[in-house]
Image (tube, rainbow, N blue to C red):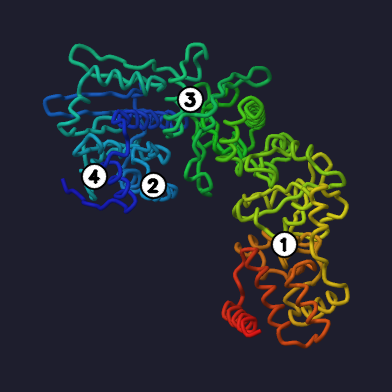
Amino acid sequence: MTEEKMRFEAEVSRLLDIVVHSLYSNKDIFLRELISNASDACDKLRYEAIANPELLAGDADFKVRLLTDNVRNVLTIADNGIGMNKEDLIENLGTIANSGTAKFLDAVAKSDAPKDVDLIGQFGVGFYSAFMVAGTVEVVSKKAGEDQAWKWSSDGKGEYTIAEGEMEGHGTQITLHLTDEFKEFTDEYRLKHIVKTYSDHIGIPVVLMKADGDETLNEASALWTRPKSEITEEQYKEFYKHNAHAFDDPWKTVHYRAEGAIEYTGLLYVPTMRPFDLYEPQRKGHLKLYVRKVFITEGADDLLPPWLRFVSGVVDSQDLPLNVSREMLQHNPVLTKIKNGLTKKILSELETAAKKDAEGFETFWENFGAVVKEGLYDDASNRDRILKIAKFRSTRDDGWTTLADYAARMKDGQKAIYYISGEDVDALKRSPQLEGFAAKGIEVLLLTDPVDEFWLPSVGQFEEKDFKSVTRGGADLNDVKADDSDDAKDDKKDDAASDASLDALIASIKITLGTGIKDVRESDRLTSSACCLIADETGMDLRMERLMKQHNRVDEISPRILEINPKHSLIKKLSDIAIKDAKDPILSDAAQLLLDQARILEGEALPDPIAFARRLDNVMEKGLAS
């Protein structure tokens, strides 16, 4: 028998290094992961056998078997599921296809927290937890419908071998050669406790093979089919971790049975932690579809809209045919009704949580709000319900607000819901475009999720109040009555530049900047800054245009409007120069510097940093000489 030696993919090697150095604080977890994988393998074969019953080859009694040898210090976990061929072993055990794993590994490496963060199962790589307790791991597997078995072996130190093997029937047998310190995992009572604690929900028997007779260690019935009164909170948690390959506890558990025109059972979970791959395009959901307790498919994207892709669990239908295919699922009216029912049920749970568990809901929103808001532009039927539970940061305080609360606080004369968008809340709070709104006591929403740029145009209004960006023209601040205290402050401010001198400065700036700007005008939104850039009232929002440029949807950023503050001392002095001598060289440098300053405040890269530095040098030199 010729062995073929191969090296692990780089990410697997990094992962194994973390595992070996105690990623898990609880070593029992390895058995849960291996039993969970075995159960999944049996589910997959049960589904494949619907169309190809010959795959079962007379072995339809699915089970997971545990065999111990306390003399040789060996533990074996075997199943009669789908099995693997050579290519499957290389793909599943030698590489990690999930791109989110790299982010996970980087996060763990950079974290100052202890490395017992229990996150590995999110990526479906729990098999590698076996190396926490074993010096060598051997896998013998035969794929259902094939004749050749294959043997995979590794000590977890960078390489593995593959060779032809021998095996009766189909399935997978994993043999762990335990290190001396983990001999405890050959003890029958220890194994019974672990299975009862972590794997009681597994829908197939987990059997301990003993000389005096085999013993089934779990309930061996699908958890979602049991009455809720008979299921403990711990059993719900363990099923969530098994199903979603997760290590956090669920934030919400929704277990219900729909009856009527269609019948189905749903056991759904909303996680506490955000998966690392939540925004990966190739991410598959963890919602499994069953038909009368027979597994059909995993990652059933047709069961929930994309904006609920963080939800995991199972749906068991009584009305779908057992031989349903993925193609049939896409056009099945029963599935459409199930999808609508599940979506409304989850929305109802979120609405209740928003009212009764404000702190918990805010934590949920921090993790998943950006995903939920995707529903505002691609799920019109649920848009109003999402808008009512949506949370936003604002200039009012450091907490969250709803749109309804914002609307209730709107000032007299305020006709729109104002917002500003960017990458960072703190940076947005310092934006010069907010100055006039702050002076009037007008609250502004601070939007930092890229998705905000897409749902706002499609939604348009909330309770007949338009959404309006503060980075566009037409703010209508003059219609809003200022607070008395703010009026008093305005009275103490220096007078603005005269109309004539300001007009002269604006004309000079327009000549200097030319087509680099769309217009120059006096600002009513600035109180302490000299200038800012805004988009035309009918133009594209500043951040939206930057995002479009980043994704090559537009070739160039369109010229903006430069607004200047007539009460700012710099603008007043430049206005005095302009009215006396419109050709003074300092006006040209000043115009370019004002534009570049406004670009910097917007977080934009300067088109010519060298020219900016030269102009700044010139102006500083003249200032020091005067």
Question: Which disc, if any, is residue 294?
Answer: 3
**Is residue 328 among the parts visible in the rendering?**
no
4 and 2 marks in contact (CB < 8 Å): no
Q: Whole-Å distance between the Cαs marked 3 and 4?
A: 35 Å
- N-terminal of the two: label 2 or label 1? 2
- Specify whether residue 365 is in view: yes
Find the distance from the CA under tag 2 to the CA under tag 1. Answer: 40 Å
How far apart are the alpha carbons under marks 1 and 3? Answer: 67 Å
Residue 107 at x, y percent in the picture: 41, 48
Q: Whole-percent x and y of residue 144?
A: 35, 34
Precedes in sequence: disc 2 or disc 3: 2
Residue nearer the viewer, 424 or 373: 424
Amino acid type indicated by mark 4: Gly
Residue on which disc 2 sits: 111
Mark 1 or mark 3, which is nearer to you?
1
- The answer to whether mark 2 and mark 3 are in CB contact below 8 A is no
Mark 2 or mark 1: which is in front? 1
The residue at the point 38 percent across, 32 percent down is: 41
Residue 384's spot in the image, x, y percent? 74, 36
Earlier residue among tags 4 and 2: 2
Look at the image and tell me in which quarter the C terminus lies: bottom right
Q: CA distance from mark 2 to mark 3?
A: 42 Å
- Tag nearer the camera, 2 or 3: 2
| SS type, badge 4 | loop
Mark number displayed over residue 528:
1
- How many discs mark residues in the rendered view? 4
Q: Indicate the secondary structure of the residue bearing disc 3.
A: strand
> Does residue 110 appear to the left or right of 316 in the view shown?
left
Task: Residue type at mark 2: give it.
Answer: Ser
The secondary element bearing badge 2 is classed as loop
